[in-house]
Amino acid sequence: MPAQQNIADMIGKGITVDAFESQMKPDYQEKMKEWQNGFVWTDHSQEVLSFLRTRSDLHCSIIASDWCEDVHRNFPVITKVMEQAAIPTEVFIQEDHPAFIDAFRTLGGASVPKVIVSNTSGDVHFTWGPRPAFIQEPMAAFKAKQLTESDADFAVERTRAYEGIQARYGEDFDYQKLVVYEITNLLSQT
């Protein structure tokens, strides 16, 4: 079993959710606002998350970049979940913290948003991101092929993976239920 990661040296060095949103380019803010405005609580997650309000030992770090479509879609949902659970949250801009994202790669890539929930001493309980597992499956299948950019099929297969991701996200807000479910489930196990 690998040693537990600790991010104590990063806690308190991020920016607020509001500061991250306000520094975004206006067109990125608009894209994110569309997904934010479509968010609706639809299950019992609010109740589970409200129970976590009694805890004061949790902390959330989110690594994000304003240009990323997964951030536009998922960041508003993630922050609603953390707000409902009353978990202090700070944001680290990926480009300003390359070593931080390198420590929390997904399938070998520096993918964002990356959610890192720890205790207040920095011991990491879990990570999540950049997207729900079902939506991530096409990328996982692509990465499992272990193609390199010099392989003839690399570009075609990568395009197929991104098309599969977009198809699974869909055009509406239903995918947000997966984000809420997965993060709520992880939080309830901490």
Image (tube, rainbow, N blue to C red):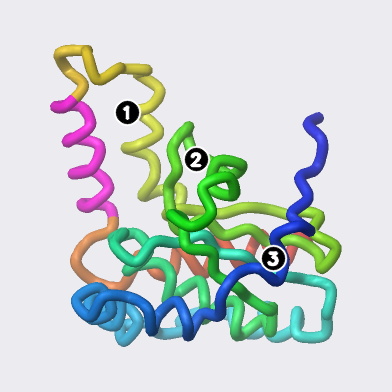
In the rendered structure, the answer to whether residue 1 lies left or right of residue 72 reads: right
Q: Earlier in the sequence, mark 2 or mark 1?
A: 2
Q: Quadrant of the N terminus?
A: top right
Residue 147 falls in which quadrant of the image? Answer: top left
Q: Residue at x 58, y 45 (%)?
A: 99
Residue plotted at (60% across, 77% down): 82
**Farthest top residue in view:** 151
Viewer-proximal residue, 125 or 108?
108
Quarter of the image with the C terminus in it: bottom right
Q: Give, as a three-letter code, the residue at label 1.
A: Phe
**Type of the residue with mark 2:** Thr
Q: Which residue is mark 3?
A: 187
Write down the region rendered in magenta: 155-168
- Indicate the position of residue 9 as horizontal and vertical percent values: 76, 57
Magenta stretch secondary structure, dominant: helix
Closer to the chain start, of discs 2 and 3, is 2
In the rendered structure, the answer to whether residue 155 lies left or right of residue 32 reads left
Instruction: Find residue 96 and report its horizontal and vertical position in percent.
Output: 48, 57
Total numbered circles? 3
Reading the image, the residue beneath label 1 is 142
- Tag nearer the camera, 2 or 1: 2
Task: Please tell me which residue lies in front, 105 or 50.
Answer: 105
Q: CA distance from mark 3 to mark 1?
A: 29 Å
Q: Badge 3 local density, few (<14 within 10 Å), some, or many (20+)?
A: some
* Picture residue at 59% right of the left edge, 49% below the top: 100
Residue at the image position 46 percent from the left and 81 percent from the top: 42
> Residue 106: which numbered mark, if any?
2
Q: Quadrant of residue 184?
A: bottom right
Residue nearest the viewer, comparing 181 with 104:
104
SS at badge 1:
helix
Between the C-alphas of marks 2 and 3, the distance is 19 Å
Query: Height in image: 157 above or below 113?
Result: above
